[in-house]
Amino acid sequence: MDSSGTLWFYYGDVDVGKIVAFMENNTLTIFTPAYNRAHTIGRTYESLCRQTSKDFEWLVIDDGSTDNTRQLIEGWVAEDRITIHYVYQENQGMHGAHNTAYRNIHTELNTCIDSDDWMPDDAVEKIVAFWKKYGSNEVAGIIGLDATEDGKIIGDKFPVGLKTTTLRGFHEDLKGSGDKKLVYRTDVICNTPEYPLFEGERYVGLIYKYHMVDEIYPLLVSNDVFVIVDYQDDGSSRGMWRQYWNNPKGFAFLRKYDMSQTHLWKRKLEDNIHYVSHSLRSRNWNFIKESPLKFVTLLTIIPGLVLYIINWYFVRKGRLYKGV
């Protein structure tokens, strides 16, 4: 495409356009991992076209789609309504798409909007205005709200008067619930380690990087809705039993990290039970030796075995479950 920067097609994970000086200097990158979501990503696109502020660019990471995702993007580029960057890669899973996205973002801020979700018309305007008013090098970004199409907030709002929090602090210390929309400073999120890739697996919890950021900076709190979510039956949020079964190394990795970071003993026990279950599934017989809490892991072998059997049963029955 021409120097307007409306479209860049990349294959692999290196964005050569990132070093081109004439690219727009927008504040926000909205990135969307897409895997065979041609039937839903149109809502995402249309919501971005309706934004009252155009201080953003859209980065689509096509994670090996076999449907007509690329053709859709090409058609939208021809419409020339918003700035679009497109990166194609062989399928790596959601976390692998996030790795690639972070390598290709050059704006000050970024946020992920899934390919089955969309943004309220004024979301970008609110994000950018809020950041320009309150943002600083002392915070990692902004934490806002998710809602359903009928306007219902996912989980809890933030307490009135709360200025900053961490994602872990909101869930563990404030006992808050529900998915939240995270807007990160690009330099902060990119300076944390990438998600590991495990051969034959396609899932590592995205919360891994978010919790690492929690250890460094808090997030500014906003009770504005930044995204409308639509959980799909074949998505990651649903069908977690299947995700557990198919990606045991990734889940064991996350639980091992989490058990060493959380200060809640209830959470440490839950993490150890899951860690045992995933280790049994992956046939890792060194899981006690590798655990950062060896004694607790030893105590949770029986509950972990029970969870492994439950996981096997639910997968066999095809049951969907939104797990912890």
Image (tube, helix red, strand yellow):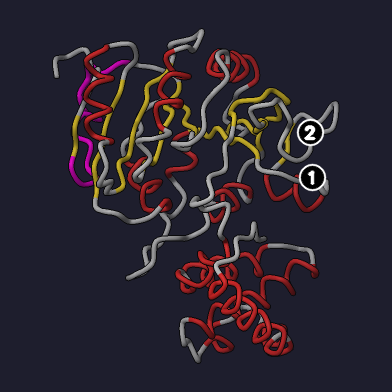
Above or below: residue 66 compared with residue 76: below
Mark 2: few, some, or many residues within 10 Å (few <14, many ≥20)? many
Instruction: Name the residue at 82% across, 49% down.
Output: 175
- In the image, residue 10 lies at what x, y percent? 19, 37
Quadrant for residue 292, please give it.
Answer: bottom right
Q: Is 289 or 321 nearer to us in this picture?
A: 321
Q: State the SS at label 2.
A: loop
Segment colored magenta: 11-24
Q: Which residue is mark 2?
A: 158
Q: Is 302 or 74 nearer to us in this picture?
A: 74
Image quadrant containing the N terminus: top left
Image marks 1 and 2: residues in contact by CB distance under 8 Å: yes
Question: Magenta segment, principal secondary structure?
Answer: loop
- In the image, residue 295 lies at what x, y percent? 71, 87
Residue 146 is at least partly visible in this image: yes
Whether 253 is among the magenta residues is: no
Quadrant for residue 261, please give it.
Answer: bottom right
Instruction: Name the residue at 63% across, 48% down.
Output: 214
From the viewer's perspective, tell me whether residue 63 is left or right of residue 202.
left
Q: State the SS at label 1.
A: loop
Q: Earlier in the sequence, mark 1 or mark 2?
A: 2
- In the image, residue 116 lies at what x, y percent? 48, 36
From the viewer's perspective, tell me whether residue 127 is left or right of residue 43.
right
* Residue 176 badge: 1
Instruction: Name the residue at 78% across, 33% down.
Output: 157
Residue 102 is at least partly visible in this image: no
From the viewer's perspective, tell me whether residue 138 is left or right of residue 63.
right
Quadrant for residue 288, please give it.
Answer: bottom right
Above or below: residue 321 compared with residue 20: below
